[in-house]
Every structure is written in C-alpha cells, then in structure tokens.
Image: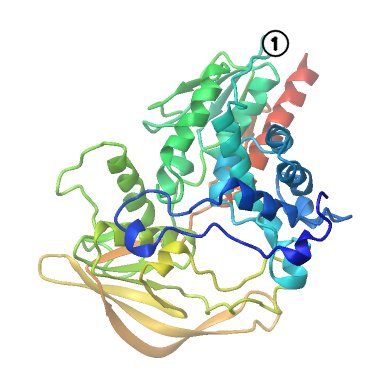
Amino acid sequence: MGNPTAFLTVPRQEAGYRPIHDRIRDFGEVEQTLNTSDRKLQASRCMDCGVPFCHWACPLGNRPPEFQDAMYHGRWKEAYEILSLTNDFPEFTGRICPALCEKSCVLKLTADAPVTIREDEAAVIEAAFREGYVQPRTWPRNGKKVAVIGSGPAGLATANQLNRKGYEVTVYEKDEYIGGLLRFGIPNFKLNKAIIDRRTAVMEAEGIVFRTGTMIDPAKLPEGFDAYCICTGTPQARDLKVPGRELKGIYLAMEMLAQQNRVLAGQAFTKEERISAKGKRVLVIGGGDTGSDCIGTSIRQGAVSVTQIEIMPKPPVGENPATPWPQWPVVLKTSSSHEEGCTRRWCLNTNGFTGNSQGNVTGAEVEEVVWEPAPDGGRPVMKPTGKKEIIRADMVLLAMGFLKPEHPALPDNVFVAGDAATGASLVVRCIASGRQAAADIDSYIRNKQ
C-alpha cells in the first residue's frame, strides 16, 4: 500500500466512453483509456484491505491489492506477473468482465466508489504486450495428449493450462475462427477481435495446435488422446414459441451478432442472407447483456429506432436493499449501447407477432404483467394484467438467454468445462472453469500412470 491516504484524496476516475456521435459510426472499441499517470493514481486508491473481498469475489482469485501496488510504484512487469498467476487472459476480462471484484471492494460498500480494478487490469496487460513482457515460452513435454473441443474462453484456458503442464494440446473448433463466444457473441465495439488473434498467436507459438472448421461429435471423439475436455458452450438459444414466430424479420440474437462480426472480418453475404437493421424499427426482447449488444449493433447498422423490452420488473437505481452484499447487486444497468439511444420497458410479456401479406413481421403484441411473491417464498409468480398493445417493429431480435446443454454419460477421461457444464455464465467464470478442468485432467492422467 504505497499511499495509505489515496482512497481519501483521489476520487474514482473511469476512462469513460468515446463520444456517442463518434462511436456509433463504427465498430471500434467504445471504451477509452487513461494516461499512465492517472492510471497509477487510480491504482493507489486500493487500501490493501486486511481481508480483501475483491480477491474473494473474483472467480479466478485475482489479487488486485498486489498488482495495483506494483502498478502504483511503476513496476509494470511485476504487476503483469502477479496478474498472470491467476488469470490466463486479462485482456478479455479487463474489457468485458462485469467486475465482481469491484462490487465487493470496500470502497464500493462504504462510499459507492470502488477501485477501478477492471480498467487497471486491462492497463496492466496492454502494457505487458506493448513492452514485450508477453513472450512465448516452452515447457518440457510429458508425452501425453489432450483434445479440447471448443475454443471459447473455457477451452482456451483449459488448453493454456494443460500446455504449461507439459501436455500436447489440440483444440478443435467447429467455426472458421478461434474464439467461440469471444469471437462471435461479443461485438467488436466491446472486444476487438485482434485482441483474440494476438493471444492465440502466442498460444500457437507455445505449441498448442488449433483445428478450425472441425465439428466434433462428443459421442465420437477423435482417437489418440489420453483425455478430452468438452468446452462447447451453450449453443441453443432460448426461443419464443408464440403465434407469428415464423414471420420473416424475427431472429435469434446470435444470428445477427455472429453475422455482423463475420462481416467485419471480411466475409460477404447476399442481400437475402444479410441481417441488417438499416432503416428499420427494431424490437429487442430480453434485457440482459446480449440484448444490449443487439441494441448497439442495430444502432451502428442504421436502425430508425430501437426498443428493448424485459419481462421482469425494472430494477432499482443505484442500490437494492433486497440484494445486499455479498449478493450480486440487482440494480439498473445502463450500458454504453443504452446511452446511444434506446427505449427501455419492463414487465412486458410477448403474446405473439403481427405481420403483413408478404410474411414480414410488423409488430409484437405485448401484455403488461405483475410479479407477486410466491406463497412458499420461492420464485415470484407472474400474472397478466390484460393490458395489451402492439409495438411496431420491422425487425425483432430474441435475446432471452440460452438453454443449459445436456450431455450423455461420458467416459472417465472426458471432462466438461465452462458454459457447457454450468449453462450460460460469465467469461471470467468460464476461464476459471477451464483452469479447474485442466487441473482435474492433470490429476486424472497422473493417477492413471
């Protein structure tokens, strides 16, 4: 703790976003950065608490007090080494993690001004790449081989950890690019895909083999490996089975988001194939992060208007007495995409869709609902009110989450990690799951010898 009074004298300063009028014209990352001097000041706010709740809250067990103290003193390589002990990919979490650590920071709990841990993390890893601290390394091989099925955050973490333990690792990916959710599910304005390429280039130089465009059936795993790890995520999105679903212009969110990322990567689509919001009134059904990503993408594509509806009630602003720490604070989240222009509504259930004679969607019939406490204290009960209306829309994007995958009985040498094991979760939790799977695989193989 280099400056014991900084938390009293240095206010929280976020890097913030690029101006709205500028950022909606492209798909470049919206978040800005602080200069090195200001970033070190922000790191100095960490109080090096006797019981670091930030460390406890992080699924990876990151050590913010340690790496931020090194930052403050200008020891950037040391900060990178501390961060890398627990986090394989700080460049991902430093951009897209909801920062569970900050929600548990003592300065959050006492003054609602947590240390900028996520931004500081991103600054450390970017400095590490810029200064050449991140260099490919090699490890002695143990003669064992492991196949990883899926190259999302869990698969990459599993492969990275196993490679460092001496295993020959092959990663199989069904799509044409490495990255899984990172590549196709997250817009470029939140995570530039060059960041993924930069990391996978290091992993390849360290000996990991990537096989893209290769679909693997878990029931027919490739031969020649001592163990396998299935990291295929949650490919099945939750659909909306209501009248009118067959109308043209209604898409699952990932259909649009993945295609847009492919377009930015240089792929071409015909006019009939292209999913574009240009000149359209867009309705996004689902109030989570995926819905927010649909909003930002639609605005950049040239939507006339964007409306987002959510079936659950509107969360409180700022603080929610119903979810005190150490629970995750269920409060209203306003993303950079929301700021760019969007009508948001809550407690609306979708009864069906309307269309025209050409079979195109023209709107959605929604109904207000109320949520009443369950008699047994369980999940609240939704009750329709009978208040219905039509929301006009030329395009509808369904962003209602994903179904947890079901797996058949697997052999002892087959492991499952990430969203494939838990259902849809956070990137940081997937990385943690991948690290744990690698440890389990290593233990399994060692015990078989």
Whether residue 191 is visible here, answered yes or no, is yes
52 and 356: which is toward the camera? 52
Q: Work out which quarter of the rendered image holds the C terminus and state it.
A: top right
In the image, residue 225 sits, relative to residue 198, either above or below, namely: above
267 and 102: which is toward the camera? 102
Q: Is residue 317 left or right of residue 305?
A: right
Q: Is residue 28 left or right of residue 209?
A: left
Q: Residue at x 35, y 50 (%)?
A: 27
228 and 34: which is toward the camera? 34
In the image, residue 328 sits, relative to residue 15, either above or below, namely: below
Query: Which residue occupies the extreme left position in the image?
Result: 357
Query: How many marks on residues?
Result: 1
Q: Residues within 10 Å of mark 1 (few under 14, many from 20)?
A: few
Name the residue beneath numbered marker 1: 140
For mark 1, give the secondary structure. Answer: loop
Q: Position of residue 71 (x, y in %)?
A: 71, 43
Q: Position of residue 14 (x, y in %)?
A: 58, 60
Q: What amino acid type is highlighted by mark number 1? A: Pro
Q: Position of residue 228 (x, y in %)?
A: 60, 26
Q: Residue at x 41, y 63 (%)?
A: 337
Q: Position of residue 430 (x, y in %)?
A: 61, 43
Q: Residue at x 63, y 40 (%)?
A: 124
